Image (cartoon, grey):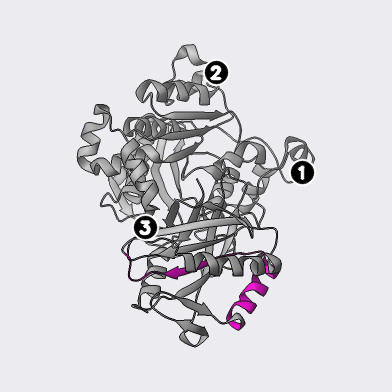
C-alpha cells in the first residue's frame, strides 16, 4: 500500500509542533525522497520545515494561508535536489483527521504550481488530528491516491493506519488458535501486526534457516526468502528443515516448504538469487523489515544502505568461531539493528571496503583483478551457536515492531564468558550512509551498491 515513512520519531515531532499552535491550524512543508521501484508509492521524509508565524497571511481555527514567498525557496530546492513535497497541516479540533472542502480547494490551487516547479515526481498532502491522520499522494496535479499507512522507522518501528483502513483490518484479521500463546504476550493487536508484516530473510544458511523457522512459528504474514545456494552435505549440520533428501535442492525452496508446514497462512516468495544483484534484490524494496543473515560483506553493504536510503529497517546477524586445528580460540555473535538514529555498519567500521569491492565484482571482473588471490576458506558453523544468536535477533525484531521490553539494538554474545552485552553506539554525523549528508531517505535519487548485471 502507499505509505509515508518518517525517520525515528518524526511523525510525533511533526504532530506536536503543529498542535502547539492550537486552537489555530498550523502547517509544515516536508521534503521527501520517493521510492517508486516498489509496487506502491512510498515517500521518505528527509526534512521537516515548519511554517513560522510570520509566514501565514491567514491562520485561523478552520483555515490557514501560507505566503508564497515562504514556499518559493522550498520549491526551488525540490526542483534542484529532486525532492517530493508533502504539504502537512493540523486539525487541532479533531481527534481523528479528514481533509475538509477548504483543504481540497487549497490543494487544487497549489498542486499545479508544485508540479510545475518540481515535475516528474510524486507529491502529497497529510492532515493530522490529535491522534489520527489522512493522507493522499498525487502523480499529477489532478489525480490523487489514498495513503493509508504512515510509519516511523527508528529503534521502534511504529505503523499507523488511517481510521478507515484500521477498521477494515480489525474486521478482517483473524487470530488462529495456533498463535494463542503468542497473542497472550503480544495481545491480539500485536499478533495482527505480525500477520500484516512482510519480512525478508537474506541468506538461508545456519542463522537464516533458524530465523525463518521462528518467524513462521510467530505467524508472520509474508516472507521473502533470498539465497542463491544449494543444499550440500555439509549444510545438514546446521540447516534447519533440511534432510539428506534435500541435497542438491535450492535452499530457498527447502526453507519455504518448512515455513508452509509450520504456518500455512504465511505467504512465501522464494528467490534463488543474491542481494548483490539488482534484479534479484529489487523485491527487498517492497518489504517492511529485513533480516540480514548473509555471510558476504558485499550483501551486508547493500542491505545496510537499503535500511537508511529506503527507511526499511534491518537486523544484521553474525556468528564468528575462531578455531585452529580443532582448538577453539573464541566464539562470538553480533546482532545489530540498522535504522535511522542507530549507527550503521559503516559508522562502526564493520565493513572492509576491499572485501565489499571484491564481493561486488562479477566473475569476469574477478578473473582480471590482480588484487584478488586465492579462495575463501569455509568457516566453522555449529547449530547451537547459530540458534543462540538467531534467537537474540528475532527477539530484537519483536522489541522493535511490537514494543517487547528490550532496549538494546546492538548486542554482542561472548560465548566463553556466557555473556550477552549491549553495545552503546552513535551514528557519525557525516556518515556516507546513515546521515543527511549520506543516503538517508534519498530513495530512488541514489543508486545502491549492487551489480546491475
Query: Helix, strand, or loop for circle 1?
Result: loop
The residue drawn where x is 40% and y is 65% is 128
Q: CA distance from mark 1 to mark 2?
A: 32 Å
* Nearer to me, 208 or 126: 126
Q: Earlier in the sequence, mark 2 or mark 3?
A: 2
Magenta-span inclusion, residue 207:
no
Q: Residue furthest bottom?
A: 54
- Foreground residue among 415 and 33: 33
| Residue under numbered circle 1 | 369
Say few, some or many: other residues with alpha carbon within 10 Å of mark 1 (under 14 / 14 to 19 / 20 or more): few
For residue 249, which numbered disc appears in the image?
2
Q: Is residue 387 visible?
A: yes
- Region of the chain picked out in magenta, as a range: 69-94
Q: Label 2 vs label 3: CA separation? A: 39 Å
Compared with 341, 205 (above or below) is above
Residue 413 appears in the rendering? no
Query: Residue 101, how many percent across, how many down?
Result: 47, 65
Which label is found at residue 59?
A: none
Residue 24 percent coordinates (x, y): 38, 78
Q: Which residue is mark 3?
A: 423
In the rendered image, residue 76 lying in the magenta stretch gets the answer: yes
Q: Position of residue 301 (x, y in %)?
A: 58, 49
Tell me what residue is drawn at x 73 percent, y 46 percent: 371
Q: Residues within 10 Å of mark 2 (few under 14, many from 20)?
A: some
Circle nearer the viewer, 1 or 2: 2
Binning the other alpha carbons within 10 Å of mark 3 as few (below 14), some (14 to 19) or many (20 upward) gives few
Amino acid at each position: 500500500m502507499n505509505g509515508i515513512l518518517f525517520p525515528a520519531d518524526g511523525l510525533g515531532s511533526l504532530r506536536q509542533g503543529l498542535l502547539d499552535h492550537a486552537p489555530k491550524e498550523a502547517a509544515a512543508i516536508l521534503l521527501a525522497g520517493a521510492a517508486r521501484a516498489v509496487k506502491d508509492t512510498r515517500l521518505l521524509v528527509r526534512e521537516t520545515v515548519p511554517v513560522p508565524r510570520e509566514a501565514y497571511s491567514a491562520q485561523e481555527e478552520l483555515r490557514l494561508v501560507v505566503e508564497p514567498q515562504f514556499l518559493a525557496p522550498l520549491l526551488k530546492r525540490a526542483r534542484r535536489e529532486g525532492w517530493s513535497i508533502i504539504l502537512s497541516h493540523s486539525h487541532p479540533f479533531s481527534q481523528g483527521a479528514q481533509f475538509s472542502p477548504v483543504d481540497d480547494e487549497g490543494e487544487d490551487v497549489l498542486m499545479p504550481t508544485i508540479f510545475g516547479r518540481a515535475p516528474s515526481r510524486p507529491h502529497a498532502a497529510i492532515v493530522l488530528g490529535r491522534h489520527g491522520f489522512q493522507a493522499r499522494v498525487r502523480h499529477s496535479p489532478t489525480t490523487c491516491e489514498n495513503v493509508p499507512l504512515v510509519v516511523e522507522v527508528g529503534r521502534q518501528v511504529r505503523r499507523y493506519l488511517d481510521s478507515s483502513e484500521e477498521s477494515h483490518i480489525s474486521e478482517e484479521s483473524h487470530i488462529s488458535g495456533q498463535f494463542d500463546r503468542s497473542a497472550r504476550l503480544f495481545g491480539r493487536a500485536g499478533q495482527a501486526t505480525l500477520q500484516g508484516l512482510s519480512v525478508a530473510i537474506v541468506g538461508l544458511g545456519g542463522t537464516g534457516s533458524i530465523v525463518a523457522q521462528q518467524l513462521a512459528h510467530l505467524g508472520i504474514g509474508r516472507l521473502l526468502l533470498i539465497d542463491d545456494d544449494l543444499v550440500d552435505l555439509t549444510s545438514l549440520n546446521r540447516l534447519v528443515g533440511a534432510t539428506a533428501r534435500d541435497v542438491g535442492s535450492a535452499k530457498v525452496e527447502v526453507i519455504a516448504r518448512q515455513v508452509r508446514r509450520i504456518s500455512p497462512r504465511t505467504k512465501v516468495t522464494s528467490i534463488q538469487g543474491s542481494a548483490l544483484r539488482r534484479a534479484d534484490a529489487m523485491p527487498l524494496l517492497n518489504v517492511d523489515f529485513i533480516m540480514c543473515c548473509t555471510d558476504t560483506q558485499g550483501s551486508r553493504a547493500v542491505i545496510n544502505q537499503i535500511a537508511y536510503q529506503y527507511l526499511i529497517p534491518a537486523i544484521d546477524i553474525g556468528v564468528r568461531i575462531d578455531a585452529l586445528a580443532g582448538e577453539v580460540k573464541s566464539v562470538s555473535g553480533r546482532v545489530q539493528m540498522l535504522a535511522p538514529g542507530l549507527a550503521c555498519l559503516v559508522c562502526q567500521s564493520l565493513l572492509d571496503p576491499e572485501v565489499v569491492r571484491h564481493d561486488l565484482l562479477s566473475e569476469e571482473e574477478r578473473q582480471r583483478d590482480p588484487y584478488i588471490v586465492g579462495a575463501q576458506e569455509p568457516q566453522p558453523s555449529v547449530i547451537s551457536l547459530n540458534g543462540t544468536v538467531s534467537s537474540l535477533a528475532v527477539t530484537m525484531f519483536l522489541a522493535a515492531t511490537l514494543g517487547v521490553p528490550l532496549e538494546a539494538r546492538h548486542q554482542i554474545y561472548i560465548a566463553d564468558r556466557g555473556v550477552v552485552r549491549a553495545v552503546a553506539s552513535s551514528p557519525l554525523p557525516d556518515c556516507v550512509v546513515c546521515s543527511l549528508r549520506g543516503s538517508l531517505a534519498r530513495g530512488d535519487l541514489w543508486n545502491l551498491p549492487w551489480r546491475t548485471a
